[in-house]
Image (cartoon, rainbow, N blue to C red):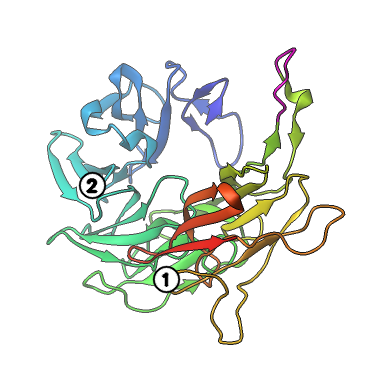
Amino acid sequence: MFRGGNWDILIAQVGGGEPLNRTADYDGVDSFPSWSPDGTSIAFHSNRDGGGIFVMSPLSGAPRRVVPPERTEQAEFSSAPKWSRDGTELAFIDHMVLEIVSVQTGEFRRFELPGSSGTRYDPSWSPDERFMAFVAAQNRTATVTELWLLRLEDREAIPLTDGQSKDWSPSWSVDGRALYYVSNRGGAMDLWQLPIGSDGALAGEPVPLTVGIGMRRAAFSNDGSRMAYSDGGRIANLWRVPILKDREATWTDAEQLTFDQSLITIVNVSADGRLAFNSGRAGNPDLWILPTAAARCSSSRPTRNQTGRPHGRRTGQRSLSTRCAPEPGTSGPCPRLAVGPDSLRAATRRITIRAGHRTVVRYRFTRSERATWTSG
């Protein structure tokens, strides 16, 4: 928890009461806690004493480092370490490598994960410890991710989802025959179940277990009888701040341009002052144009001509158009922007507005599909 300008790990009773701050002794970053199966230890990332992964008792005592900082350069920004079912090993991902360490001896096992770019996180150990599920993404804030499975015995990596939605927070069923995960493949972020065969391959289609929850993370008890989840999401809006000649601008000078309960991560300004940005304001990650006068934006489904093909010039197989309302006192739509899967889920890789009001947008669909759109 972030409180008092510091990341700490707190222990709270389910029934209520004041939580216990177990890392109050350190003013740096203590994050991503993970309970051992028997409840006697907590593993976590920290940058104390140079950094690494530490293990501590939930009630008292100093933490003990089990993974040195040189093996966790990017792991502390990734996800919580995961315990083996017998509590003797910890699994964690550092960038593109899965590491498994013995808590007692410090011996490591190392597994290269597929791909050459992006990041991997959210490792989840199957009950029989034969498989490790994980998330693949371009970065930690990517709006589109994929679930993969690593078969530890032969190091074979198997894709589980199609890379056209946000899929994360994988957890295994007690019998190891299903993988639960959080996804927006149906619109809102909800809990889904994916059947897994004995060889780690897909054994059927994903099935939704909740509808309209807006779930963020999900975790199950060891016996699978209870589930805890968090909801909500990250919010970021656009503001305009003037550059003043006589003084520094303050928040009282700022003007808010968007008022959404969604996240904006990329924005670009054209020569005439229009804004292009990505946002999940319509429920899925789309691209939007905001006129200079900051009129309200709106999104539309793909538009197609009489041949059934999308308007515009592009390569690729799927399309999405976005429009915005005209400026006050004018009529007609603003130039259409960009492009993603028919399901309205795509990962924005680049937004560029070039001279002459010609917009070039690059989109990534899946691991192999790419497209470039132009408008003008």
Compared to 345, does 342 lie above or below? below
Badge 1 density bin: few <14, some 14–19, many ≥20, Cα 10 Å: some
| Above/below status of 133 relative to 122 | below
Whether residue 264 is visible: yes
Which secondary structure type mostly characterizes the magenta part of the structure?
A: loop
Q: In the rendered image of this protein, does residue 143 appear above or below residue 343?
A: above
| Magenta residues (range) | 241-248
| Residue 208 on the magenta segment | no
Q: Nearer the viewer, residue 29 or 298?
A: 298
**Residue 302: assigned label:** none
Q: In this view, does 68 lie to the left or right of 235?
A: left
**Residue 187 at x, y = what percent?**
59, 66
Please identify the quadrant where the C terminus is shown: bottom right
* Residue at figure coordinates x 39%, y 68% from the top left: 162
Tell me, for residue 98, which label it has, or none.
Answer: 2
Q: Where is residue 156 in the image (x, y as percent from the top left)?
A: 17, 63
Q: Residue 316 carries which label?
A: 1
Q: Which quadrant would residue 87 be assigned to in this image? A: top left
Q: In this view, does 120 lie to the left or right of 263?
A: left
Q: Quick check: is 244 in the magenta stretch?
A: yes
In front of the other: 221 or 322: 322
Residue 86 against residue 245 in the figure, above or below: below
| Picture residue at 32% right of the left edge, 70% below the top | 177
**What residue is rendered at 50% in x and 56% in y?**
361
View extreme (front): residue = 356
| Inter-mark Cα distance, 2 to 1 | 33 Å
Tell which residue pokes out farthest to the top in this image: 246
Which residue is farthest right? 329
Q: Where is residue 27 in the image (x, y as percent from the top left)?
A: 45, 16
Question: Under tag 2, what secondary structure?
Answer: strand
Q: From the viewer's side, name the closer residue of 163 and 127.
A: 163
